[in-house]
Image (cartoon, rainbow, N blue to C red):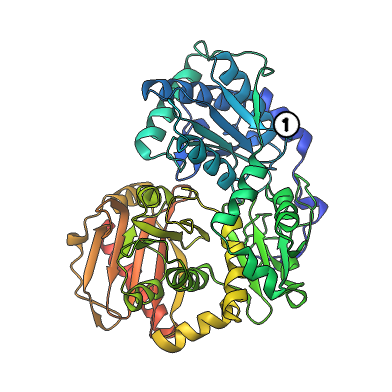
Amino acid sequence: MTDRAGTPATEADLVDLDALHEAYYSLKPDVSVPEQRVVFGTSGHRGSSLSTSFNEDHIAATTQAIVEYRASQGITGPLFIGADTHALSRPALTTALGVLVGNDVRVLTDQYDDFVPTPALSLAIITYNNAGHDDEADGIVVTPSHNPPADGGFKYNPPHGGPADSDATSWIANRANELIADGLSDVKLAEPSAVETYDFRKAYVDDLANIIDFDVIKEAGLHIGADPLGGASVHYWQAIADTYGLDLTVVNPEVDPTWRFMTLDWDGKIRMDPSSANAMASVLEHRSEYDILTGNDADADRHGIVTPDGGLMNPNHYLAVAIEYLYANRPGWKDDAAIGKTLVSSSMIDRVAESLGRRLWEVPVGFKWFVPGLVDGSVGFGGEESAGASFLRFDGTAWTTDKDGILLCLLASEITAKTGKTPSQLYTELTERFGSPAYERVDAAASKEQKTKLGKLDGDAITATELAGEPIIAKLSSAPGNGAAVGGLKVVTENAWFAARPSGTEDVYKIYAESFKGAEHLKQVQAEAKQIVDAAIA
């Protein structure tokens, strides 16, 4: 933690936009260098032009690979494409359009040349594919999400509308690297002029009436603040206010690809993370001015909820409140619609699910795991501890199959209007019923070899029988909900748990831990977790 965390950015913190754009076009990746290859993580390929990890060649090759992949899958419908407000998003969008047009793909961009949030693009795909066409649509989102201003990102969403699974992304990344190594000789390019347009904003905003109770929000007279944090939701929030007659203020409508108006995150970097109190410090200064105040990241797939009484809510806390509220106020959902959570989300959700008599569907990290359940209505809500979630429409059908930060922010207003209590107050009530958990994520050093071993670890290899004074009741290397490998380990006792996963970018592994027996017990859990994992990967 730097002592500058939460303080305003200075000129010295800002990225050089000219250098960023020049590097995008001039630097050419060498795919024999691991850091310069196309690599898809849980949210697409990310990198910076300055480090030769996100450049014109990467995007041209990745787009060509997506064209070839969709052809191999028989996907012949339109491809929706949108971009966020990062500086590298616009040149990457232009490159991608050139390749798509060069391959005769029917491509749809935003009607107003506006920024496109991830959930708006997911909704566009689902809407098209539910309309009875003879073909199927898919899409590309140009975004590195909440990453710093020097980064770019490129994400593929197949016809189900959510993040592509590892089979698709591995194929696309491998093919893209082949194309780069071969000098892009098989990449087809054309002037990106003949493209169709689509009104992402109107389609999204108008459809919100089928998933959020705006009447109850308006009748309650809530004064709402929404800060886009300089991201793609900026014009959506004003459209929502106008369409539904809400007392809603767009707190900061400024868009600046340097993000000079941000406060620094925990490590001194500019990062548009609405779940970080440091990144949200300037927003939090206004918390007493609104009944509900919210923030979104650059592509609006994450949410931050600020209440006048509780400040910025921990994402785990808000997920638990949202789940209890939704399953009591969505009678159109299936009676057996499960509650989806990631393996590293709070066990408060487990206790809420049990009290509701609902099945808990616990999956590995990554929103893609929720897609099948959201599509068929067997999962009513899917949420991640990193402030990403989505849920079903009033009638129990799919809304988005990618994370929707705008939706979860609006839900906070609906909850407050309907219950007369803020989500913070409702979470306090949950702790009075189920206990107050202490939760934290820490990092531990690990070599690349140790990280590889951890990623393939079998829970049965753990010999420990106790954790922080309690008997171990589960040692998981696959998720209980769908049996998929978790890429690490989760160990559970009656009142605590820890999960360990290797970092994809640093020589560390992440320890997520929680205890319902207080902060001191959590520290004991964390210490013993490190001992257990280190012994297993030694």
User: SS of the residue at dot 1?
Assistant: helix
Extreme-right residue of the structure: 11
Q: Quadrant of the N terminus?
A: bottom right
Above/below status of 98 relative to 528 = above
On the image, the x and y values in percent for residue 29 come to 56, 25
Q: Quadrant of the C terminus?
A: bottom left
Residue nearest the viewer, comparing 467 with 128: 128
Q: Please indicate whether residue 60 sits to the left or right of residue 249 in the image.
A: left
Q: How crowded is mark 1: few (under 14 residues within 10 Å), some or many (20 or more)?
A: some
Quadrant in which residue 20 is drawn = top right
Extreme-bottom residue of the structure: 432
Q: Which amino acid does label 1 sit on?
A: His
Q: Please indicate whether residue 148 sits to the left or right of residue 187 in the image.
A: right
Q: Which residue is drawn at 32% across and 75% down?
A: 354
On the image, the x and y values in percent for residue 308 come to 69, 79
Residue nearest the viewer, comparing 20 with 290: 290
On the image, the x and y values in percent for residue 123 come to 53, 44
Q: Which residue is drawn at 53% across and 81% down?
A: 426
Above/below status of 225 relative to 84 = below
On the image, the x and y values in percent for residue 185 come to 51, 10
Is residue 238 visible in the rendered image? The answer is yes
Is residue 538 visible in the rendered image? The answer is no
User: What count of labels does the image hold?
Assistant: 1
Q: Residue at x 60, y 69 (%)?
A: 414
> Which residue is labeled 1 in the image?
21
Q: Please indicate whether residue 109 sits to the left or right of residue 498 in the image.
A: right
Above/below status of 43 relative to 5 = above
Q: Which residue is drawn at 28% across and 72% down?
A: 492
Above/below status of 155 relative to 480 = above
Extreme-top residue of the structure: 185
